[in-house]
Amino acid sequence: YFNQAAPNLFRINKELRKIKEKVDGKRIKKFPLDKHIEEIVNTTLETGENSVLPVRLRIKQSVVVKPGVVPENEMIRCWIPFPREIPGRQENIHIIKTEPTRYILSHNLPQNTIYFEKPSCGDKPTEFWVEYTYTSYGFYKKINPEKVTEIKEANRESLIPYLQEEPPHITFTDKIKRISNLIIGQETNPYRKAQKIFEWIDTNIPWASAREYSTIRNISDYCISNMHGDCGIQTILFITLCRYNGIPARWQSGWEFQPPDDSMHDWGEVYFEPYGWVPVDVTYGLRNSRREEVKWFYLSGIDSYRLIFNDAYSQPFFPAKIYPRSETVDSQRGEVEWRGGNLYFDKWDWKLEWEKLK
């Protein structure tokens, strides 16, 4: 909180942002994202394929417990986030090497992990890591609003979990209802409702660094009370408003890459009848383009440079964790414990290294 309070002033306040840009100069983006988006759109429209422009990536993610934290030879339990096969999004996951060599994969859980146990090295660092490769696809589905309908009765039962409240963070509070009425007005088309929500958040909720989610009682309420938030906070508000308006929506998170940069990131998926589930990234927002497909790309598309760990938040691990997690909502860095309790983030270091393969 205190580390980010001052920088956040320049992210939230438009006048201060202009002053900072004047002093520092505008940040030069190294990765041509909008060109990449246009290539995805063009390839989809030319070929009829939704999953296009695959990239092969090598990942090494590590957790290192600091010296002297756990007595020597005491068993340490470690969970490192790990991707699962999602056809058309990420495929051909291949483990190259791990430390230690024995592990347990939690196949196809909403918050997927690779689990390790290892005796503490006492006064030396205790290392856990996994190295793997996978293929990530760009995705785009062109939506015709005139063809979008209410949910078909045959599909409704399977979609109920994505229309409901999910306390404490997805709740239809009076604040949510008021802001929804302001955004939606008299609109009845599900896709156009989602457009209104997407554009309102993009325009009114600037990105700002946030404190740990475990310290926030209700993330969607926090967002509209403070009128700013990071990617996960923006996404949970989007999901909440969509669900309140009868549009199925769900969480997705992991890592984003814009070569040579990378970061943890949260986004989501939304369901439009008859198109099905499509990715959505409200943080990336509306693109500055006269072409509608590019402008609204992130309401039914995603770039090729993603690593998906989670398809829901606050879900149990396998094997189950005994003590409360350090991160109670998301899962991107890892979790560690021993028989003496949970090890919080200050007791260990984490790192994700990546490389695009030719």
Image: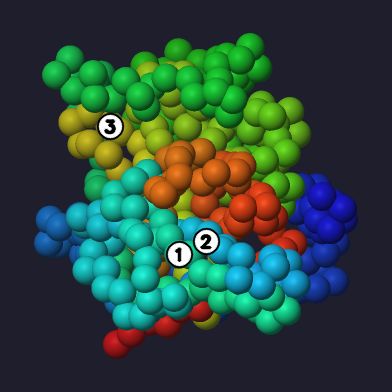
Across and down, in percent, residue 305 comes to: 39, 67
Quadrant location of the C terminus in the rendered image: bottom left
Across and down, in percent, residue 327 comes to: 61, 48
Q: Mark 1 or 3, which is nearer the eye? A: 1
Vertical comparison of 226 with 319: above or below: above
Across and down, in percent, residue 345 comes to: 69, 59
Query: How far is disc 1 from disc 3 in space, using C-alphas?
Result: 39 Å
Q: Residues within 10 Å of mark 3 (few under 14, many from 20)?
A: many
Vertical comparison of 188 with 134: above or below: above
Q: Mark 3 or 2, which is nearer the eye? A: 2
Residue under label 2, please give it.
78
Q: Residues within 10 Å of mark 2 (few under 14, many from 20)?
A: many
Please report the residue visible at 59 percent of the width from the left and 25 percent of the height from the top. 168
Query: How far is disc 1 from disc 2 in space, using C-alphas?
Result: 5 Å
Residue type at tag 2: Cys
Residue under label 1, please give it.
116
Residue type at tag 1: Phe
Q: Earlier in the sequence, mark 3 or mark 2?
A: 2
Please report the residue visible at 54 percent of the width from the left and 36 percent of the height from the top. 236
Please report the residue visible at 49 percent of the width from the left and 58 percent of the height from the top. 79
Residue type at tag 3: Phe
Across and down, in percent, residue 33 comes to: 45, 68
- Mark 1 and mark 2 residues within 8 Å of each other at the beta carbon: yes
The label on residue 272 is 3
Local SS, label 3: strand
